Image: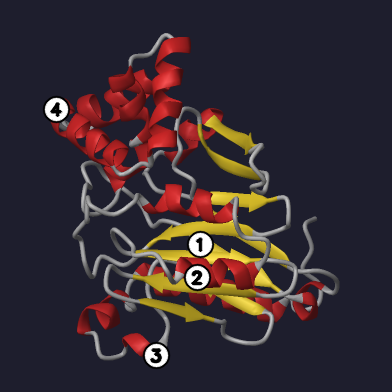
Amino acid sequence: ALYEWIVHYWVAEHHASLEKMQGVANQVYAGYPYRYQLFYRGMSQTSKLSLAQLKLINALEYFSFFPFKIGASKPHCSWLALGPRYTGSDWLVGRNYDFIDDVATLRPYLAITVFRPNDGEIPTAMLTYLGTLNATTLMNAKGLFIALNAGPSIDSSYDPNQMVVPVMLLNLAMNSANLRSFDRQIRSYRSNSTYIIDVADGHAALSYEWTQQKIVARLGERPGLLAATNYFVSPQWLHSKQVMQEAKSTARARRIHLLRFAIEHRGRITLK
């Protein structure tokens, strides 16, 4: 059903080229480590879908983002991490995940997949769409929470010779016991495009503003308060005119709204 929805939404409604979409899907798949490619080959043998169809499903979200953008999209992800002075108890993380105009129609396809490696890696839960390994929302058994936000379009290039970042995050989640361990490991990788990676454990939170050339870790606006949307905030980007242009977008307004909410309700924010 999801494969048919993808073809209808992008090809029938947005007049995208199915051949171009298959090219994107193949490029994303090529950036996966071998063990994840085997995962899809196994799925093609046990499901009623071909490997080509599964690749297309897996590339679902790439069709709405630079540099592959094909159809219409809306403002993307938001993240809010709050420490005890804002919650009155433990750390609390909120995550909004939108990326197409009609995102509500995809809700029935959301699923939580739990990876339980038998080689000593940390069990990790992934929230994403059925049939995809687009690991943009993760939490491991040690309490480390990871989320990927679409980055600003300051560099729409995509390096096909680097590992696909969402799968990289899945690897990091299964091998990071805390935020410090994650920080050491992510700095040894190179991104294949532009992203914002938000991470929190039970003690702190960080937002990584990441291009192919540079990674900048941002602590937050105030102790115990970190908000991120889809533009770079760190002063280290002030030299970039493109970043400053992005800062005037709706992404900035959404981030300011989150900060105002946190400050207004400080000490009273809960899951209820």
Q: CA distance from mark 3 to mark 1?
A: 20 Å
Q: CA distance from mark 3 to mark 2?
A: 14 Å
Apparent side of residue 105 relative to residue 66 in the rendered image (left or right): right
The amino acid marked with disc number 4 is Glu
Nearest to the eye among marks 3 and 1: give it.
3
Residue at image coords 37%, 44%: 100
Question: Do the residues bearing badges 1 and 2 touch, measured as CB atoms within 8 Å?
Answer: yes
How many residues crowd around disc 3 within 10 Å: few (fewer than 14), some, or many (20 or more)?
few
Residue 241: x and y in percent read: 21, 84
Say which element carries label 2. Answer: strand
Say which element carries label 3. Answer: helix
Which mark is first along the chain, 4 or 3?
A: 4
Disc marking residue 133: none
Residue 172: x and y in percent read: 53, 56
The residue that disc 1 covers is 78
The amino acid marked with disc number 1 is Ser
The amino acid marked with disc number 2 is Ala
The residue that disc 4 covers is 19
Question: Do the residues bearing badges 3 and 4 touch, measured as CB atoms within 8 Å?
Answer: no
The residue that disc 3 covers is 235
Which mark is first along the chain, 2 or 1?
A: 1
Q: CA distance from mark 3 to mark 4?
A: 42 Å
Which mark is first along the chain, 4 or 2?
A: 4
The residue that disc 2 covers is 228
Say which element carries label 4. Answer: helix
Residue at image coords 42%, 69%: 188
Quarter where residue 153 is shown:
bottom left
